[in-house]
Structures are given as C-alpha cells and as structure tokens.
Image: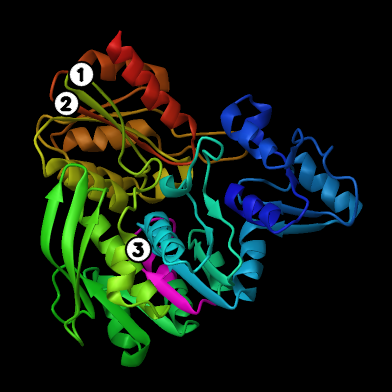
C-alpha cells in the first residue's frame, strides 16, 4: 500500500489512510515518514471516510467488517482493492514492465528501476520493498519512484490472482514454484500474463518458465540462463563472494558481452540481474548501456541484509518466506563456512498450511548438520484465520528428518535462545515477511550480543 500511496501523492493526488499497525502503536518511524509526505493518517475506525467522492483502496488483509469499509459502503464511496488501482495506473502507462514470479520480483523490479533511472529514462517504479539506492535520511522507506516519462515498472502479484488485471508491454517471469496456490492455477495465471505482453522475459533455469518459453512464439521471447547455451542472454565467468557477485553477460545472437559486478550475494541475484538486463534490452538499451547503468545497485532492505557483526557472530535480516526463497538464501549462505542459526517467522497460518510439507522438506534438505532452526508462532494482526497448522508442526517434521529445530510461542523466547546459542563464526538469519518489526528484532539482537 505504501508505494502505491507514494506514487499517487507524487502525482498530485490527495491521499489519506489508516492502518491496523498504527492503531497498535507499531512501526512509528514508517508512519512519521508517511505523514512527512503530506499523507494524513486516521484511526481505523471509519473517521477518515466522510464523503461519497472519496475512494477507499484496501489491501487483501482489510476485511469487509473493518469500520473503514463499513463507512465507505454507508457513504456510497467507491471501494477498490489495491491491485485494481495499481492495474489502472499500470495499464494506462504508455510503456509498462511487469515483474512476476514466485521469487525475486522485488529485487528484479529494483534492478530494472535503478538501471532505467541511471540511464536517464525517468521511470515510475512500484516495488514491494525499500530500494536502498533511492533511500535517503529523509526517505528511509523508498519503495516507490515517481517519474514523468510514461515508463512504469511494477512488481505484480499472483497470490490473489490479481496478476490477471495487468497488460504489460514487457512481462518478466523469473520462476514458478508452489507458494500461494496450486501449480495448475499458477500456470494459467502466468501464461495469461505472458500472452498479453509484447515481449516475454523468461528464465530457462526454471523448468516451469522454460516450458512456457518453449510454448510461446520465438520472436516474443527474451530468455536468460546461468547455464543453458540456448538462452538469449547467459552468465559466464561467475564469481561468488559473501557480499557480492560478478559475471560476464553474453548475448547469443550477436556475441556482445558486458562485465557486471553487483553488491548483492548469491547466484539467484545473477538470475535477477539477467532478467533486469533482458527487460532493459526490450526497452531499447544496448547490453553495454544496461550493464553500465546496473552497476552500483545496492539491493533492497531485508534481502540478505547485513545488520551487524559482534564478536564473530553475524546477524542478517532476510525476507525469505516461502520454500523457494528460503532455499536461495540458505544455498547462498552455505557457499561459505559458518553455522547457521535460523529464526523463521511464518507470514500467516494460511501459507503455513498450504506449504507445510514443502517447508519441512526445504529446511531438512538445505540445513547443515550443525544448523539450528527456531520458529515462533506465525505473524498475526487480527481477523479470522484457520490455525490448523502451527510452527510446532513444521519444527516436528524437520526434527523427524534429523535436523535441529525448536518452536516457541513468543518471538522473545526465540531471541533469548539465539543469543544463548550464538558462538564466534555463527550467522544468525532472521527470516519472514509481512512484519516490519522483524528488522527491529534483528537490530536488537545485535545490541544484545554487544552487551
């Protein structure tokens, strides 16, 4: 909701809002930032809705029983879901780039936004995460960029089916894996997204997206890969470091090459970079222009973000919340020595039920013998929810597969255990989504380790 509000405000609209977390006294720094943008905040009690001329825009987490929704309906004000409004803005843009996939959407969106900005294309960027390159002391929550060129870059979400609303000029699909719905529904949604685009950017290293690339007209596809020589853009001479990656990007058709070095780790970020470069090529930039503009990309908040190091113990904050993302994070970390102390806070009871077995298999397969998994209860801000599957169920399954795992109802107890276990050489990774206080939790761990 925040980047959408920032884009509307940047285009001169009057914007106000409410949030359950505001009423609960959480994440005050973010709300101070919102007010500083000229966005008025109200309690979520209906008091902000006073006229039928207002438009209520709400996320999927805001239920019909919430007083703001009740007030909007009483007044006859238009009631829109977040994707409806975003799709209207996106589809109205003269040139739109939509970034989709189970994993890597936000990072790839940030990369495309940064390189187009550096190439003086003045894009509007809608992201689901804070882009470090655009963050300043006065704009710590820079999850959006407002441009004037008519070029609109947006992360698009499949979790609620709203991806069907977007009509991109360029459609980027990084990968497909089980996340919010079954695979048959995902395939249908993603295929429709690609069909509506003029250019489809697809990853040949993922079986699902490779199959889609093979099924589309050849002239429509721009493919990329870390290993497949048939891809239009391939990474060679790959160098992985604990905090960075470097590689040579080579185009198949004309043999053009460019050196790329990024201050973000992991092979998955090479794939994200190839996707961004491919999208830039579809915008008319040369490979040299795009790779030069991409240099200096510093990543997103909460994407394997180094929080601090104390006495040989490193604390990392990470957004990983589904098996695909968790696998990418753990594989990146296991490329270098050191035990992993993992705290994973599930982002809801619904996803936990859907991906129960996938979570268990993921941790069991990707954890080392000495690694420890610690889980609190899923994040919960109120509303109706089925609590049939708990964190204890995941932990029990991981233990049955001979990995070390513990569950605590309260997150504070997880922090106590992490501090108790931490030894020099360990890396503590705080993982989870939909909860801005996880970053505060990670920072507090660093302070506790100092003491």
Label 1 or label 3, whichever comes before in sequence order: 3
Q: What are the residue bounds of the magenta stretch?
A: 167-187
Taking the image as shown, residue 174 lies to the left or right of residue 19, namely: left
Q: Return the residue found at the far front.
A: 120
Q: Which residue is mark 2?
A: 426
Residue at far top of view? 451
Residue 358: in magenta span: no
The location of residue 424, given as percent across then percent down, is: 14, 19
State the residue position of label 1. 422
Residue drawn at x 39%, y 56% is: 179
**Pointer 2 and pointer 1: residues touching (CB < 8 Å)?**
yes
Q: Of residues 65 and 131, which is closer to you in this image?
A: 131
The residue under the point 73% across, 48% down is 64
| Residue 161 in view, yes or no | no
Query: Which residue corresponds to mark 3?
Result: 293
Q: Dot 3: what SS?
A: helix
Q: Nearer the viewer, residue 66 or 312?
A: 312
Task: Please tell me how crowded label 1 is: few (under 14), some (14-19), or many (20+) other residues with Cα within 10 Å.
Answer: some
């Amino acid at each position: 909701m925040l980047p959408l509000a920032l884009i509307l405000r940047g285009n001169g609209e009057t914007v106000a809002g409410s949030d359950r977390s505001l009423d609960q006294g959480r994440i005050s720094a973010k709300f101070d930032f919102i007010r500083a943008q000229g966005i008025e905040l109200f309690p979520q009690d209906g008091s902000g809705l006073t006229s039928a001329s207002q438009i209520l825009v709400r996320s999927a987490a805001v239920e019909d029983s919430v007083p703001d929704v009740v007030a909007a309906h009483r007044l006859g004000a238009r009631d829109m879901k977040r994707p409806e409004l975003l799709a209207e803005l996106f589809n109205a843009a003269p040139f739109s780039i939509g970034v989709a996939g189970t994993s890597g959407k936000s990072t790839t969106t940030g990369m495309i936004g940064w390189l187009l900005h550096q190439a003086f294309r003045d894009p509007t960027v809608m992201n689901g995460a804070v882009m470090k390159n655009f963050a300043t002391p006065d704009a710590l929550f820079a999850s959006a960029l407002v441009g004037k060129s008519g070029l609109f870059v947006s992360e698009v979400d499949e979790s609620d089916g709203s991806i069907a609303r977007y009509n991109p000029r360029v459609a980027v699909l990084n990968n497909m894996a089980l996340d919010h719905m079954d695979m048959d529904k995902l395939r249908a949604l993603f295929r429709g997204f690609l069909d509506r685009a003029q250019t489809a950017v697809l990853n040949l290293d993922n079986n699902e997206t490779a199959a889609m690339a093979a099924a589309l007209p050849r002239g429509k596809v721009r493919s990329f890969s870390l290993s497949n020589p048939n891809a239009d853009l391939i990474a060679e001479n790959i160098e992985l470091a604990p905090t960075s990656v470097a590689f040579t990007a080579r185009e198949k058709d004309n043999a053009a090459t460019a050196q790329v070095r990024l201050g973000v780790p992991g092979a998955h970020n090479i794939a994200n970079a190839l996707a961004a470069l491919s999208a830039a090529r579809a915008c008319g930039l040369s490979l040299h222009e795009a790779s030069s503009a991409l240099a200096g990309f510093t990543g997103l908040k909460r994407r394997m973000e180094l929080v601090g190091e104390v006495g040989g113990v490193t604390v990392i904050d990470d957004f990983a919340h589904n098996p695909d993302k968790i696998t990418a994070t753990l594989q990146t970390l296991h490329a270098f020595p050191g035990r992993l102390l993992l705290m994973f806070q599930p982002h809801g009871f619904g996803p936990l039920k859907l991906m129960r077995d996938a979570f268990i298999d993921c941790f069991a397969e990707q954890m080392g013998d000495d690694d420890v998994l610690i889980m609190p209860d899923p994040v919960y801000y109120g509303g109706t929810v089925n609590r049939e599957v708990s964190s204890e169920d995941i932990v029990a399954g991981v233990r049955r597969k001979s990995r070390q795992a513990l569950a605590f109802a309260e997150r504070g107890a997880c922090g106590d255990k992490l501090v108790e276990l931490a030894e020099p050489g360990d890396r503590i990774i705080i993982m989870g989504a939909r909860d801005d206080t996880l970053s505060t939790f990670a920072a507090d761990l660093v302070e506790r380790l100092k003491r």
